[in-house]
Structure formats: structure tokens, C-alpha cells
Amino acid sequence: MQGGSREPSKRRNPRGIEGVISLTSLCEGERGVVAYAVGGFGLVRRLADMGLTPGVEVKLLRKGSFHGPVQIEVRGVGLALGYGVASKVFVRPLKAKPDG
């Protein structure tokens, strides 16, 4: 195991892909592009049925307190995911676009 410090707000990335964080690590209002989901076939299929597939943009709307549900917007539809499921979805954060 390698030593070194990790930022506590960023969940460990199981595939080791640079710049990818857990959906639960996004702040409210931030957007990201789904990179992959970690889990069994049933979970990955269920997420795909909800529209959470690699390459799709998501926006984190609200995080429940004490690891409560996470509300997101994907493909124009609002969804709520349990914290455990949301922590298995990994995204590439998008930079905020300046209003103008």
C-alpha cells in the first residue's frame, strides 16, 4: 500500500482514472460527466435504465444530511439515489460556466 495524503472529500477511485470522483463528492449545483459505475450487473443495469450511462452529463441538485439521498438531474429528469448507490457512480467534474 502506498503512503501519502488524500483529500478527505474525494472518495478513492477504484479504477485509478485521474480526475474522476464519486458523485457524492460533487457539491450542490455542480455538474459532471459519468465515467463509470462500480457494482454488480444488476446495479449497473438499473442505473443504465435510469439514464446514468457513461458520457451523460449529470447535475447534483441536493445532498441529504447524514448520508441521506442524493438528488440529481440527468437527461432533464430529476432522480433520487441512495447515498450508497450514488457513491458507486464516478464522474469527471465539469468546470462552472461563467454567467454572461
Image: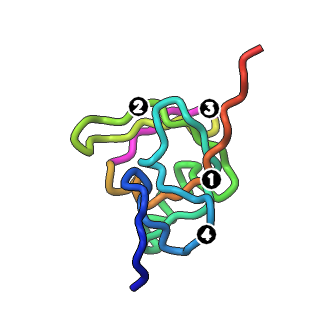
Q: Give the range drawn in magenta.
A: 76-82
Mark 3, secondary structure of its residue: loop
- Residue 62, numbered circle: 2
Q: What number is the disc on residue 17?
A: 4
Vertical arrangement, residue 92 with respect to residue 69, above or below: below
Question: Which quarter of the figure is the C terminus placed in?
Answer: top right
**Cα separation between marks 4 and 2:** 26 Å
Mark 4 or mark 1: name the one nearer the start of the chain. Answer: 4
Q: Earlier in the sequence, mark 2 or mark 3?
A: 2
Q: Nearer the viewer, mark 2 or mark 3?
A: 2
Q: Where is residue 46 in the image (x, y as percent from the top left)?
A: 47, 59
| Mark in front: 3 vs 4 | 4
Q: Which of 15 and 8 is in front in this view?
A: 8
Which residue occupies the extreme left position in the image? 66
Nearer to us in this view, 82 or 12: 12
In the rendered structure, which disc, 1 or 3, sits on the residue that comes first in sequence?
A: 3
Which numbered disc covers residue 92?
Answer: 1
**Residue 76 has which mark?**
3
The Cα atoms of the two marked residues, 2 and 3, are separated by 15 Å
6 versus 99 height, above or below: below
Tell me the SS state at disc 1: strand
Up/down of 58 relative to 53, above or below: above
